[in-house]
Amino acid sequence: FCFGPAFLVMMLGPKEGEPNWLAVAALALAGAIYFPMAMLGVAMFDSLAALNPMLVFRGIFAAPGHYLLTLMVFAGLAAMKVFTGQLKTVIPYVGGLIDQFDGLWSAVFLARVLGGLYYVNRRKLGWF
């Protein structure tokens, strides 16, 4: 849902030549900004109905400073994942193990960061 528009522009773009990479990058960035709050909403409400843009945008604008910090943590972990992904080619077996561990650790850490975001801003979000 979050990255669907970027994927559609990339796949269903012009049949001849390259797709509009600027539009793809802009939609992917918008999806990356939307994704953490959407994931938190789905986890808290236990329903895909929490992907509703009204709920997600209200949550983003309720705690913009903390959400920006959360986005920076997500970006840092994504950069670390790119780095550990390159280790597979440099160190054949150990690099892959490090990359897999980084993926697991990042998922757990990001869940913790999103939980902290909700806990600190639970009154501002007003979800329950």
Image (tube, rainbow, N blue to C red):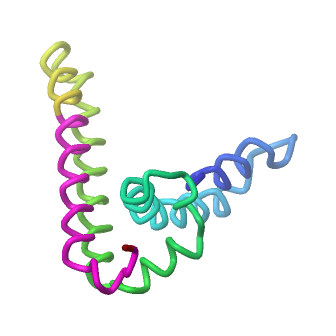
Q: Residue at x 87, y 41 (%)?
A: 15
The front one of 22 and 67 is 67
> Residue 122's x, y, as percent?
27, 77
Magenta stretch in the rendered image: 102-127
- Identify the residue shown where x is 16% and y is 20%: 91
Q: Residue drawn at (20%, 44%), measured in percent from left and top?
A: 108
Would you place residue 21 above or below residue 102 in this image?
A: below
Query: In this image, 29 relative to 68: left or right?
Result: right
Q: Is residue 24 above or below residue 118?
A: above
Queried whether the magenta region covers residue 17, the answer comes back as no
Measuring from the top left, give residue 79's x and y in whole percent. 28, 51
Q: Position of residue 104 (x, y in %)?
A: 22, 35
User: What residue appears at the point 41 percent right and 56 percent down from the top-left corner?
Assistant: 39
**For the view shown, which residue lies furthest in the front direction?**
128
Q: Was residue 116 drawn as part of the magenta stretch in this picture?
A: yes
Question: Where 76 sits versus 13, above or below?
Answer: below
